[in-house]
Amino acid sequence: MSNAPAISLRRVSKQFGDVVAVADVSLDINDGEFLTLLGPSGSGKTTVLRMIAGFELPTSGEILLNGNDVSNEPAFKRDVNTVFQDYALFPHMTVADNVEYGMRVRKVDKAERAQRRDEALRMVRLTQMADRMPAQLSGGQRQRVALARAIVNRPKVLLLDEPLGALDLKLREEMQTELKALQRALNITFVYVTHDQGEALSMSDRIAVFNGGRLEQVGSPRDLYERPATAFVAGFVGVANLFDEETSQRLFGRRAVHTLRPERVRVLAAGASEGHAARVVDSQYLGAEMRITCRLDAGVIVVASVPSAQARIASRDEAVALSWEPSAVFEVSASR
Amino acid sequence: MGERLEQTPRVTDSGRNIAGRGKPRPAFALWGLLSAPLAWLLVVYVGSLALLVVSAFFSLDDFTGKPTTDLTTGNISEAFTQGEYVSLVGRSIGVAVAATLLCFALAMPTAFYIARLASRRTRRALIVALILPLWTGYLVKAFALRAVLAPGSDYGDGGFMSGLVGWSPGFGYVAVTLTLAYLWFPYMLLPIYAGLERLPNSMLDASADLGAGSLRTFRLVMLPLLLPSIAAGSIFTFSLSLGDYITVKIVGGTAQMIGNIIERALLAPNQPLAAAFTLWPMLIMVAYLAVMGRAGAFKNL
Amino acid sequence: MKKVSALAVALLGVVTLGACGGGDDGGAMLEELGEGEGAVNLVAWAGYVEDGSTDPNVDWVSDFEAETGCEVNVKIGNSSDEMVELMQSGEYDAVSASGDATLRLIAGGDVVPVNTDLIPNYADVFEGLKNKPWNSVDGKAYGVPHGRGANLLVYNTEAGAAPSSIVDMFSPDSPYAGKISVYDSPIYIADAAIYLMATQPELGITNPYALDQTQFDAAIAALETQKSIVGQYWALYTDQQAALENGSVTLGTTWQVIVNLAKANGAKIDSTLHDEGATGWSDTWMVSSKAKHPNCAYKWLNHIISPKANAGVAEWFGEAPSNAKSCALTADPNHCATFHADDEEYFSKVYYWTTPTKDCLDGRDVECVPYSEWVNAWNKLRA
């Protein structure tokens, strides 16, 4: 049992009426792992999270927690806790009562309840706010109460549903660091839902990318970025040049979809001995880098990303040559 | 983590703007706009209530049954100290409470089903179906229940109920309670439904997530959050039931409530005594509203 | 603001009118009959003003409307108290008042004397009904006699042998216990007094409307005992009718008209006069002091005591007509005999509804319980 993954999804599908929200997803999430479910809205990532929590039951397939099949267990019997996107704090209870709620319904004795509550509030630095009502707190504070309310129950798995979505950018970045630190301190499994690929890349041990209800690829941030398995993953995680089958045939001599990261493209002066002749369509200054959009003579658009320090401002319509290492080009499966 | 609490002071600032530095004109216009309805409220509503209270102190010409302006406390002491009337008031409160509880017991699951479980189309159909009875007459409904509840006997057939199940509560306090609950049900359903609509799904998910089963979620989360809605509904059902006298006449058999004794006094005719009796429901409602207010029923108003 | 203060004045007026309206000795009696006003508003007992809508054969209103052009609007009064209350509103022109309402209406100035010279049919009214204490004051007629009758005992014919005694209405051992129907009005205390006249002669009751405190308390005690065997207190005549039809009531005080209506719907019931003597009524049509249609009201008074109309209403309601010529016109030739129309001996056993006063109506030199106390006691009994 101890070797079993914290969470196992086995061929899980979920349908709402005629709409397939999640199709045939299998995924193992390891103990102590920070796993992010990434995808655009409607991709099924939140539904997967809700099925792990027990708010939705799968139409087919199995969900195992620590090797136990909980597919048909209701939420309140599962040893997982959730931080909700809108925090879902109980507005009629104080911060302390909110944090104690889980222990109260599980009949933890009073002394232990108080001690664990104080500890949880200390972890999220809200000790002085214990007697406030949620309406008296700022967005960030509410977020931390929601976190305290979940971790105080010492779940084996913490589910976080876009928990930082409602916060402004600065606060969000602070909270990302905070969450990651918390996860290390608690040493429990985090399953984190977001549509923000930057957030996913910076926090996760592994990322599972969803698209149209299907699991596209699972891997470490580096894997996903450098070795995207599908055109969708390549496009969704970072920026990518995608070449369709015909273009690939012409450029690379292989009839398959290929991808190439912009930073792997070198922009050379026209008439260089290597590379493909192209013309500049547009160039954007982005601070650390410049993004130069070019059209190959063959008509294909290629974006190149060049460190600003090494590039001069290319003018529109200027003739250039683009080159890349063959190893920078990957074959990916076409998007479904 | 050091974000500042900027929201709260800003709200206060803008509030001060309107109250303090605002020009006098809008306030003047506001009063102009409100004066007509306010005057109407004062004269018709408060005025007639005041006259009612005053007339409770008038005396009665024994023979003609007409009030005279000789002042007396006899009506008040008659209405408030006679054991028969106090027990009648007690029974009336009992019926009103029972009808309210019955409305609540029926409205809560119904509203929950409509607001949370039904598909959008079913929801619309159900709401219409449940509000539709409001558009039919009170008397029609009361007589419909009379036809349902009529007791059977050895010499004649009873209503639908005794025909179908062979038993009916007959006419009396039980029938009155059932009928009142039937009549006022939509007044309980609608506020609870509206409250449930406003209740975020995630609140219930969160409770389940933290380990609470449905009953505990209902008691600890739903009920407290719906309390203002339930209180609003109960104020309707309780006050409408407490003041009712026609339903009692139709399905009450020998049962009587405050409204009947007021009607009796009016028809006697003994208007001062009737006025004294009406102080009962007024006081009860004031007390009821106070209790509901303390329970936080008006927090969201 | 003017409108508002006008409204306040109007509101105050409502109360002062109610408070100070009494004691008016009445307006002028009508001296000569003029043109009809096109309508007349009546307060009447159920069954007194029938236009064929209840039963196509029961109609003495349509003729009247056609002849006089006075459209008849009727408001059913369910008790004398209700009638007094309705007449105090001033919205009605005439009323069919029983003896427990007439004097209150006269004293309250709600009705005016009637000029019997303007009512040709008055000449044919039984002499025994004219100039009686309940319809005249100091020789001045305050209305025209409508008819008289007794409150009957109705019983279910399948529930056993026909009852004959008022004791079945009051005794806890009554075979009809639990299915007894009682008229829900303070005046019913007089029925209890009649029961006591038969069962407790030592109380010395001679007139059920003249009860001293001891006699009154005994009557209330009898009614308290009766409570446990009562299945229905009826205030609306239709309530008793429905209960008789579905059998939930098998014995009760009734009016013949209710029996007629229920029988027509198939109820297996019959009515009888109990042996001990009964309460009853002698009704009088009176004209309001605030009548807006006095000429039509006079025309109605003349019409309702005309031989044909009076015969019709007497048969339908189940009472003795007031017009002697009506007896020849009833569908049942024996109607007048059955209802003892000119049998003053019989009516000496009927105690007409009248308003109890402090001065005992039987002439005793003690204080009797006045009607306002009857009302309070009845309300408490029913509370």
Image (spheres, rainbow, N blue to C red):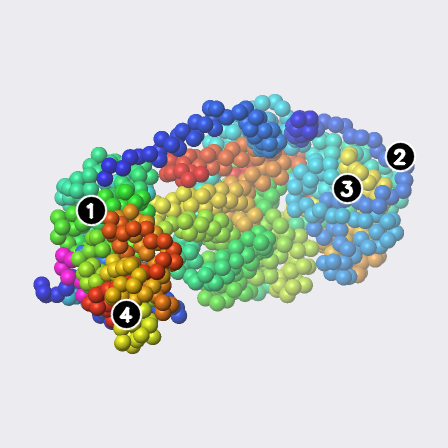
3D distance between C-alphas at marks 3 and 1: 93 Å
Quadrant for residue B262, please give it.
top right
Tell whether A242 sits left or right of B94.
left
Q: Do the CB atoms of the residues marked 1 and 2 lie less than 8 Å apart?
A: no
3D distance between C-alphas at marks 2 and 3: 17 Å
Q: Do the CB atoms of the residues marked 2 and 3 lie less than 8 Å apart?
A: no
Give the image location of residue C1, x and y in percent: 66, 26
Tell whether B236 sits left or right of B47.
left
Disc nearest the viewer among 2 and 4: 4
Q: Mark 2 points at which residue?
A: C31
Disc nearest the viewer among 4 and 3: 4
Tell whether C176 sits left or right of A57.
right
Q: Do the CB atoms of the residues marked 3 and 1 lie less than 8 Å apart?
A: no
Q: Which amino acid does label 4 sit on?
A: His
Quadrant where the N terminus of chain B sits is top left
Q: What element carries label 2?
A: loop
Nearest the viewer among C3 and B181 is C3
Queried whether the magenta region covers residue A31, the answer comes back as yes
Image mark 2: chain: C
Q: Mark 3 points at which residue?
A: C94
Numbered badge on residue A258: 4
Tell whether C91 sits left or right of B224.
right
Give the image location of residue A47, x and y in percent: 30, 61
Instruction: Identify the residue at image location x=68%, y=55%.
Output: C256
Q: Which of marks 1 and 4 is nearer the N terminus?
A: 1
Q: What stretch is highlighted in magenta?
A: A27-33
Nearest the viewer among B250 and C285 is B250
Image mark 4: chain: A
Q: Which amino acid does label 2 sit on?
A: Glu
Numbered badge on residue A177: 1
